[in-house]
């Protein structure tokens, strides 16, 4: 674990979040905003090599668009059952750690993606969090993969998946102790 930057208001650490969280005090965090990995595969050495080579793997490699060179994006349609179980396993480890370090009534806002959001929600609910809804982030994904592969000319009317137009950002709360107002009093001392 390495502290890479600190100023009067915040510090940035370069660490494995699961290891780092274990070292934090119980009930010492008031909120968590996080963008965890949507899939556990995309940052493996093999997938990163494919991204560098510009071919294959989980990466969709977009063409330059509107004069801007876009970054490769992972495709979640290529995840296997095993990959999805790894996403679930990661969040089954992360959610109890977050539950431990958060104060009662604290929220977690977590960026995720339509095809794995249910796995993340399951892990957080099992850890004891209340599911408090979703914030919809409007996105326009690149078109592609929505037609039958190698069959898009023969079946031009067939779509195999709707084009994603939003990302669900999940909202969880560690249950309050008593009413919300009692928790606010404890935290603010007012
Ligand atoms: C969805 S990306 C977040 C991207 C980031 N919001 C950005 O805009 O650059 C998830 C990130 O989590 C990192 N990651 C994966 N496992 C991790 C772990 N155990 N601890 C900390 N970071 C991890 C990945 O390397 C990846 O950079």
Image (cartoon, helix red, strand yellow):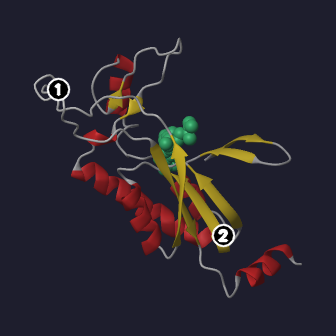
- Residue 120 vs residue 108: left or right? left
Between 35 and 10, which is closer to the camera in this rendering? 35
Dividing the picture into quadrants, the one containing residue 19 is bottom right
- Residue 157, how many percent across, how many down? 19, 32
Q: Give the vertical position of 81 relative to 69 (above or below).
A: below
Q: Give the vertical position of 185 relative to 148 (above or below).
A: below
**Image point (54%, 66%), residue name:** 97
Whether residue 16 is visible to the viewer of this picture, yes or no, is no
Which residue is tagged 1? 152
Q: Give the vertical position of 85 relative to 183 (above or below).
A: above
Badge 2: how crowded within 10 Å, few (<14), some, or many (20+)? many
- Residue 140 vs residue 1: left or right? left
The mark lying in front, picked from 2 and 1, is: 1
**Image point (74%, 47%), residue name:** 11
Badge 2 or badge 1: first in the primary sequence: 2
Whether residue 147 is visible to the viewer of this picture, yes or no, is yes
Residue that sits furthest to the top in the current view: 67
User: Could you say whether the residue bearing mark 2 is in a helix, strand or loop?
Assistant: strand
- Residue 182 vs residue 131: left or right? right
Residue that sits furthest to the right in the current view: 190
Instruction: Report the Cα–Cα distance between label 2 and label 1.
Output: 48 Å
- Residue 48, how many percent across, how many down? 38, 29
- Residue 166, how many percent across, how many down? 47, 45
User: Could you say whether the residue bearing mark 1 is in a helix, strand or loop?
Assistant: loop
Which residue is tagged 2? 106
- Residue 4 vs residue 148: left or right? right
Q: Does the closest atom of ligand 1 sit within 8 Å of the Cβ of label 2?
A: no
Residue 135 - label: none
**Image point (78%, 77%), residue name:** 184
């Amino acid at each position: 674990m390495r502290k890479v930057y600190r100023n009067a208001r915040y510090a940035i650490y370069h660490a494995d979040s699961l290891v780092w969280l274990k070292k934090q005090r119980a009930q010492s965090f008031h909120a968590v905003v996080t963008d965890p990995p949507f899939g556990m595969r995309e940052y493996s050495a093999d997938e990163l090599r494919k991204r560098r080579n510009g071919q294959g793997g989980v990466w969709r490699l977009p063409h330059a668009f509107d004069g801007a060179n876009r970054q490769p994006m992972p495709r979640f349609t290529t995840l296997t059952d095993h990959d999805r179980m790894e996403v679930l396993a990661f969040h089954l480890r992360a959610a109890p750690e977050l539950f431990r370090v958060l104060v009662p009534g604290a929220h977690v806002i977590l960026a995720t993606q339509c095809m794995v959001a249910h796995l993340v929600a399951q892990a957080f609910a099992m850890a004891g969090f209340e599911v408090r809804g979703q914030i919809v982030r409007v996105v326009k994904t690149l078109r592609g993969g929505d037609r039958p592969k190698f069959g898009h000319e023969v079946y031009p009317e067939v779509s195999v998946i709707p084009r994603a137009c939003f990302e669900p950002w999940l909202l969880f709360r560690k249950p309050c102790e008593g009413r919300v107002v009692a928790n606010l009093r404890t935290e603010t001392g007012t």
